[in-house]
Structure formats: structure tokens, C-alpha cells
Amino acid sequence: MTRLPNARRTAAALAVASLMSVGVAACGSDSGGTDSTAKDPAAGAAVLANLDEGDEVDPDEFVDTVADGVEASTTAHLEMKVSIGEQLTTEASGELDYTTTPPSMQMDMEIPGAGTTDMVFVDGILYMKMGETSGGKYWKLDPADEDGMLSGMGLDKMMDQSDPLAALKAMKPGIDTVTFEGNEDVDGRDLDHYELTIDMATVMKSYGAGLPSEAAGALPESVTYDLWLDEEDRFAQMTMDYPIMEQEMSMEMSLDDWGKDVTIEAPPADEVTDMPDMGGLMSPSAGVGA
């Protein structure tokens, strides 16, 4: 198969890395109905009620409350910006649909060196179109393919956790602290700000992801996430910054328009093609490492 030039391998890696980031937002809903345990939304909301700035919330109760807050939600609009050092910055927008199992996603991204990238994640399969780089067609990436790129990056097992409840439970052991930072006006929205300290080794172990040693060694011991929740305790905004492979990675993501009508479908078969060899994608020379 044809190998891609380094710059385009890097762009493709950033696109996939951005998709992985969306998994954090997907942790907020259990529309698949896999949890038959009855929950009391009022009891969950009480956990986050009447907090003062600096108060800590039990991580388990926080996760359960956020899950309850979006349990009845169906879809959301996503805006995201991801930067890796000074090399690459990409902005994306799209839609999330939690009525499917696993959740579906459609996202358009602007990636330097690759132009507009269209991404669709439906029925557990990722389709990615990168203009001339992909010949005007969608590459198909199957997380279940042991020889595929996602498996080679150690991300296949993480994508197995795309069921929101499973992902939420997998993250829970790695949350060390949840601190209430106060109520804030964010772009005209009245949001509650929380700071989460995450133990990366525990999270990766709970996900069961077997990252290559050089990638795992590049991960920081802990990461701080800033989360903003709306009045129904749903994800509204998230930001994070952390060093990786001697570069700074940052991400900003917001979700709104919960419940809007969306249609997310796999591209027609005649618009799908095999993905070329992405050899060396995980090496430092590829530019993005983990």
C-alpha cells in the first residue's frame, strides 16, 4: 500500500487524536440503556447544589451526577480546537447522537497541510475523508481490526469504551479530585466550573489501552481538566493543557444545542476506500507521538 508523507501522516494522526478527545464528552450520556438501575435525578443534582468555591466533590458522585444530567438528552452540537505545540492547530465542529449504540458523530475539521477533513463515526466504524490525500473518498478505520491503524496506536481498546456508561466507569478510578471553582458567565451561558485532577496511569490501565512504550512514557503523571456544566449538569465546555513528547498539547471543547434534530449516516459504499499504509505514525518523526 502507498505510504503517506510525514506531514500528511501527522495531519491524519491529529484528526484521529481529536476524535479520541470527543470520547470524554461521550462519557456524559447513557442513552444506550445499558444501566437498568433506577436513578433519582433530584438526588444527583443535590450533590452539586449549594457548593462554595473551593469545595471538593466526591469523584464517584460527580461522575454519577453528570451521567444523570444528560441521561435524557439525545444529541448535541460540538465545537473543538486542538493544538500540538506550534506545529499544528485544528478547529472542528460537528454533531453527536447519543440515541445510537455506540454514540454516532459527524465532524468537519480544518487541518494545516490537509485542508478540510470530514469524519463520521457510526456503528463503531470511523470514516475519514481528507480531500486529495484520501483521493476524495472516505478511508474506513475499524477499531476491531487488529492490524489497523487504531490498534497500532493502542487506541482500539479505548474506542471499545465508546459506550458512554462503560467509558464513564472506566474514567472514574483515575479521578483524584473534583473541585468546584464557582459559577461563571461563559459566552452568555451561566455555567458551573469544576477542576478535575486525573491520574493518567490509572485511567490508561482502566481503559485497558496498550500504548507503545515510548508513547506511554511521554504521558504526564496527572492531567488537569477544567469542566463547565450547564443547568442540567451536562457537559458545556472543557479545556485541558499538558506536555507530551516535549510539546504542549491543548484542547478546548464546547457542547450545546442539546436535543436538536441531526442525521448521521455512514457514507455510501462507492465513496469508501481502503486506507493506505500509515507506517511510522507513532514514531517521534511523525510529529505527534502519543
Image: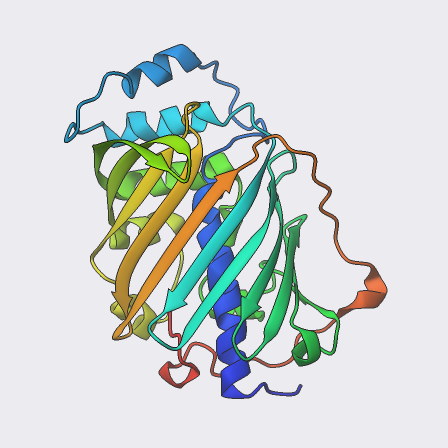
Q: Is residue 180 visible?
A: yes
Which residue is rendered at x = 45% and y = 58% of the image?
A: 81
Where residue 31 appears, as percent x and y from the top left, is 58, 29
| Quadrant housing the N terminus | bottom right
Q: Which quarter of the picture shows residue 238?
A: top left
Give the vertical position of 145 relative to 134 (above or below). above
Q: Which quarter of the picture shows residue 211?
A: bottom left
Residue that protrudes farthest toward the front in the picture: 188
Q: Please give left or right for residue 226 compared with residue 179 in the image.
A: right
Where residue 197 appears, as percent x and y from the top left, is 22, 45
Where residue 169 appears, as percent x and y from the top left, is 39, 36
Which residue is rendered at x = 68% and y = 48% of the image?
A: 123
Question: Depth check: 214 or 194 in front?
Answer: 194
Question: Depth check: 148 or 11 in front?
Answer: 11
Where residue 71 appears, as percent x and y from the top left, is 51, 25
What number of labels is visible?
A: 0
Q: Please give left or right for residue 144 compared with residue 224 in the image.
A: right
Residue that protrudes farthest toward the left in the picture: 54
Q: Please give left or right for residue 6 compared with residue 141 in the image.
A: left
The coloring applied to the image is rainbow
Q: Is residue 146 visible?
A: no
Question: Depth check: 32 or 116 in front?
Answer: 116
Q: Please give left or right for residue 4 compared with residue 161 in the image.
A: right
| Quadrant housing the C terminus | bottom left
